Amino acid sequence: MWRSALVLQLVVLALPLWAQDNNTTTAFTPQDCTLDCIRQGAPGCEYCRITRADIKEALGFNSIQEFGSCIPWPCLELLGEEDPKICQHYVQAPNDVKVESVHEPNSTSETILVSWKPSYYGIAFLRGFQVSLQALGGSTIACQLFLFHRNVSLMATHAQRVYKSDPFTGLSVGSQYAVTVMALPVPEEWERFYNSKIFSTRSCEEKNGLEQCKNDWYPKYVEVQQEGTSITVTFNLAPQNLGITSYFSFCYANGMKTYTEIMPNSSKNKTHHSYQLNDLQEGTNYTCEIAANEVDSVRTPFNVQVMYIHKEGPRTHVVTTSLALILPLCLVAVVIIVVILVALTRRKPELQMKIRDIKPDIIRQYPDNGSQEEMVSLPRSRLTPPRLLICYSSFDCPAHVNAVMQLGAFIQQHMATQVCLDLWDSLSVAEEGSVAWHCQQIRESDFVLAICSQGLNRRFEPSGLESNDEEADRQLNFNAFSSNAAIQLMVEEVCRAKAKGQDLSKYMAAIFEYSEETDIPTELRLVSHYRLMSDLPLLFSHLHGVALHRPGGYLKINNISEESFAKLPAGAALQWAIHEAGLAIGGKRPTSVEEWE
């Protein structure tokens, strides 16, 4: 009897180990544990979430006020009091980081869940993970910390385990985020200990369906009919719950444009509406678009081919009237043609001499109004979008740095370009150092853009006054040094390429409207430089290698111009950031040489 009880007890105790070895691919979700449970290594604390309250209990102060929204991991305080060596081992970055959307009842927000697998290297010393989520172009918005209890020691076979985070809630739909999964512990000598992934949340149409999204809705059904000279277009109306009451139609061909405003009467038909297209020429093919009369609405394209209409009448009367009118007109036309030919023959040498003296500013004042509009695709020589590194000076003011960040977000979202900005890769900058990070990005980027401002030409000197915030002064000096060092690296690359006779198209300089041409360093005036946002189309042309002008036509890029970029949400944010930076810098610009010194 005693032997049977002993055998049964051994089987029960061995069951968790057997299940653990044969279910290495099982997904592990966080548990609610106490710090005492983790420190003592109790069986119910294999994979635990650590809250801010736990950090406050361990440290004795509020970590939010000291460290911001991200929860730090004080390894020595949580696990290393009894054995400090437990916090000194190196663990490789996690693998196979994935992001999945989960059910979210709120139609205006998104909830995601992050999963990953631990690396083989250093897995025996793995103590947990830290997951951070950052909005692209913004600051860190959420962090989560997960720890194993002190007695857990994973084996190489456990590298196939899948660990999951807690849900990240309240994310904006149709937005880009970067998630970073960090393996713990992190020693003082940092290596590649984290894995980052950029993802986009589902759009409103993908999450809720097109009929529930006002900004994404567009007419799916468009039918065109011609009866005589009348062109009738029928399309489906938006659902009444979206609150769309008016629409517009836009047709163009041979340089001619026709705009039609549409005001349907929903009391007659709540699903479809028909309207007339007027002032269209016979025998002409038109390209048309129809959309809701809302800001940044999605347009539905369609084609209209206007057929010739043959009219019949009394033939005798027509012939007599035609002869009576045509003969005098022919004589007058012949006389006019002869006079014009004689005048052109005499003035041709004079015109050839004058056409060479036309100034560029006159050409701008009298553009070719007869240019035709057409769709032009970007060159397909590259498989990935061009990579652009943006360098700037952080010495001016925070408003200028915000304007640079908003510019990077606009270029990445609407100019088909991958932007590299140190503000978006703070972990790599902290790991590698600012100078090493910028050196690597300059080598790997297709283009480098320097945003010039008065801070580039202004050398930093101590004011001699005592400051009450030494930490702020230290951070300001570090940022100024890092940004100036990055610009200096770019200047050296430009001078080296110029000396070797190499192509300088990789490097560009730009200023915002609140800066001056003199803010561009002398060395960077060797490369192409632009004023933003008036030269935004030229910057797009430089990045993608497309010509804006050609004989008889020009390239027009939707929403990539000084007049139209602010129609986009990212463009409106950029315009406001430039305005605020102009107000902040306008009162600081020196008026004399002594003020620069």
Image: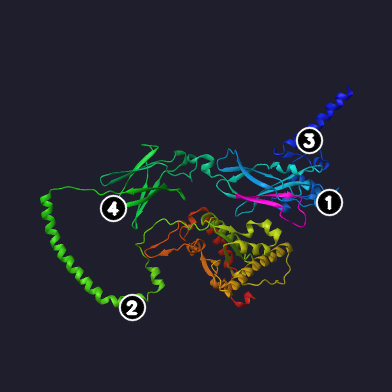
Q: How far is mark 3 from mark 4, CA to CA?
A: 82 Å
Secondary structure category for the residue under label 2: helix
Secondary structure category for the residue under label 4: loop
Nearest to N terminus: mark 4 or mark 1: 1
Q: How far is mark 4 from mark 1, CA to CA?
A: 84 Å
Q: Which residue is mark 1?
A: 85
Mark 1 residue type: Lys
Pair 4/1: label in front: 1
Q: Residue at x 68, y 57 (%)?
A: 428
Report crowding for label 1: few under 14, some 14 to 19, many 20 or more residues within 10 A (C-alpha): few
Q: Which residue is mark 4?
A: 281
Q: Which residue is mark 3?
A: 17
Nearest to N terminus: mark 4 or mark 2: 4
Mark 4 residue type: Gln
Q: Is residue 191 magenta?
A: yes
Pair 3/4: label in front: 3
Region in magenta: 177-198
Q: Which residue is mark 2?
A: 353
